[in-house]
């Protein structure tokens, strides 16, 4: 027998009547208060507005997507010298304001921009940071902070004069695996750190990867592998040695001197820092390593930590080595470091307090690299780091 739509409605109506009779006994559906006091994202209009300057591989691949995960920051402006790329990315991300490098200074008139992220080649960091500060914006400048320590001083002075927050993009401080390592070092299991080994490098490939071209030109790069990749070993090791202070440094150049890639900048440095506590950090930095190296080992008096890789975007891993065994320590997803960094900077800027990785930290690291070069220029003679 065919069942038509009317029969079905009548049948379901009977079921509905029965359900409604039962409902008199059941609890009424009603809204509860917000449970667990969750941290909610800020509504878009209350978030800090960001301009990204320089739409290269890092900005497009890592920084801009991070705003999709951010809770306290929104992307409001883009700055680039390439009009087609600018229009396409602005359209894709729904970004209202676009600027060329020529009209960059007019960001001063835009109240939708609170913070500026500088993602240009290193040789342009100081100029574009200072112009943004003079336009009354807070600045998060990519690492390494600048080409020279004198440029870093000028950037810090400009931030003080403008009364704005200046930070350096040391994303590793916001990366969960490194945060887990730091928590273990602060705890009881590792004991005082005695030795840190830091190995960072890759094969510079200007023929096949255009972003490596400016990295080999001194005017745009500031320096060689130490500026680009070795800085992770220095900065991350000192993060784990909080409360300690670097006292002396020695370094030697370690790369083939006849390699035409390294006419302007160094291709590799092996370095060693002695800390006030007696701990030693020994590192290597290279544009001649295969495969990509990003390794940190923290040897403590009681047990040790090994990170391999240690400072990548997505794959960091941490092992606790103790009693002849290695136990992998779980941590949150590494990719959250980008949104974590941008939101932490937004909060620091809103409160007018220093960012976790301030300009002064970027300045310290450039001075340490300058000292590594000074020692290497003298064939590895130790140089004092007192006052750095
Ligand atoms: P990239 O070459 O991919 O991008 C550089 C951008 O700057 C390009 O869009 C380019 O068009 C623009 N630009 C403007 N003027 C230029 C000039 N005169 N010469 C060359 N390019 C010019 O480089 P990238 O890898 O995106 O690096 C950009 C910055 O980000 C650097 O400071 C780098 O150290 C930093 N970075 C940081 C991380 C990190 O993990 N924090 C990773 C990679 C790069």
Image: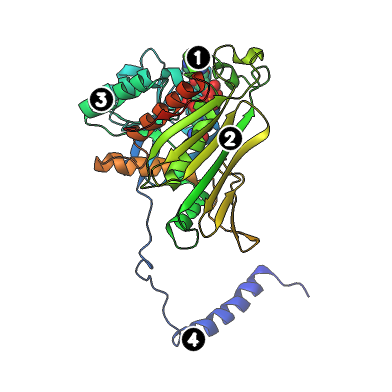
Label ID, residue 157: 3
Dot 3: element: helix
Residues at discs 4 and 3 in contact (Cβ within 8 Å): no
Q: Earlier in the sequence, mark 1 or mark 3?
A: 3
Q: Residue furthest front?
A: 381
Q: Does label 4 or label 3 sit earlier along the sequence?
A: 4
Label 2 CA crowd tier, 10 Å (few <14, some 14–19, many 20+): many
Q: Residue at x 36, y 23 (%)?
A: 149
Question: In this picture, is 249 found above or below 301?
Answer: above
Q: Residue furthest right?
A: 1
Q: Picture coordinates of residue 35 (x, y %)?
A: 38, 68
The label on residue 218 is: 1
> Which residue bears the numbered disc 2?
200
Residue 310 located left or right of residue 155: right
Asked if ligand 1 lies within 8 A of label 3, the reply is: no
Among the two numbered marks 3 and 2 on one chain, the one whose residue lies closer to the N terminus: 3
Quadrant placement of the C terminus: top left
Q: Is residue 227 left or right of residue 126?
A: right
Res. 21 mark: 4
> In terms of depth relative to the viewer, which is nearer, 143 or 165?
143
3D distance between C-alphas at marks 4 and 2: 71 Å
> Around disc 3, counting alpha carbons within 10 Å, would you say few (fewer than 14), some (14 to 19), or many (20 or more)?
few
- Quadrant showing the N terminus: bottom right
The residue sitting at 49% across, 49% down in the picture is 194
């Amino acid at each position: 027998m065919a069942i038509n739509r009317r029969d079905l409605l009548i049948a379901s109506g009977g079921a509905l009547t029965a359900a409604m009779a039962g409902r008199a006994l059941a609890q009424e559906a009603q809204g509860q208060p917000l449970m667990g006091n969750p941290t909610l994202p800020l509504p878009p209009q209350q978030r800090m507005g960001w301009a990204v300057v320089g739409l290269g591989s890092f900005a497009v691949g890592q920084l801009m997507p991070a705003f999709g995960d951010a809770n306290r920051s929104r992307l409001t402006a883009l700055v680039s010298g390439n009009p087609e790329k600018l229009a396409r990315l602005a359209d894709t991300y729904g970004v209202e304001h676009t600027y060329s490098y020529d009209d960059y200074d007019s960001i001063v008139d835009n109240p939708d921009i609170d913070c500026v992220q500088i993602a240009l080649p290193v040789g342009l960091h100081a100029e574009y940071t200072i112009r943004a500060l003079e336009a009354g914006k807070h600045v998060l400048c990519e690492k390494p902070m600048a080409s020279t320590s004198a440029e870093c001083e000028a950037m810090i002075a400009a931030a003080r004069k403008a009364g704005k927050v200046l930070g350096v993009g040391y994303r590793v401080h916001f990366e969960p695996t490194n945060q887990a390592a730091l928590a273990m070092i602060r705890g009881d299991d590792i004991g005082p750190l005695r030795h840190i080994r830091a190995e960072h490098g890759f094969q510079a490939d200007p023929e096949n990867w255009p972003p490596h071209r400016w990295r080999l030109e001194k005017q745009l790069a500031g320096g060689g592998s130490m500026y680009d990749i070795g800085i992770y070993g220095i900065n991350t090791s000192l993060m784990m040695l909080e409360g300690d202070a670097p006292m002396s440094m020695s370094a030697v150049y370690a790369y083939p001197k006849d390699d035409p890639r390294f006419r302007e900048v160094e291709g590799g440095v092996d370095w060693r820092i002695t800390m006030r506590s007696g701990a030693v950090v020994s590192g290597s930095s290279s544009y001649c390593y295969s495969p990509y190296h990003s390794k940190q080992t923290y040897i403590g008096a009681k047990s040790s930590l090994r990170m391999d890789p240690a400072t990548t975007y997505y794959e960091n891993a941490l092992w606790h080595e103790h009693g002849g065994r290695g136990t992998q320590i779980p941590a949150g997803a590494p990719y959250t470091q980008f949104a974590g960094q941008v939101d932490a900077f937004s909060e620091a800027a809103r409160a007018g307090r220093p960012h976790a990785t301030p300009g002064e930290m970027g300045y310290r690291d450039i001075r340490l690299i300058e000292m590594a070069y000074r020692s290497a220029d003298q064939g590895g003679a130790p140089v004092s780091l007192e006052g750095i």
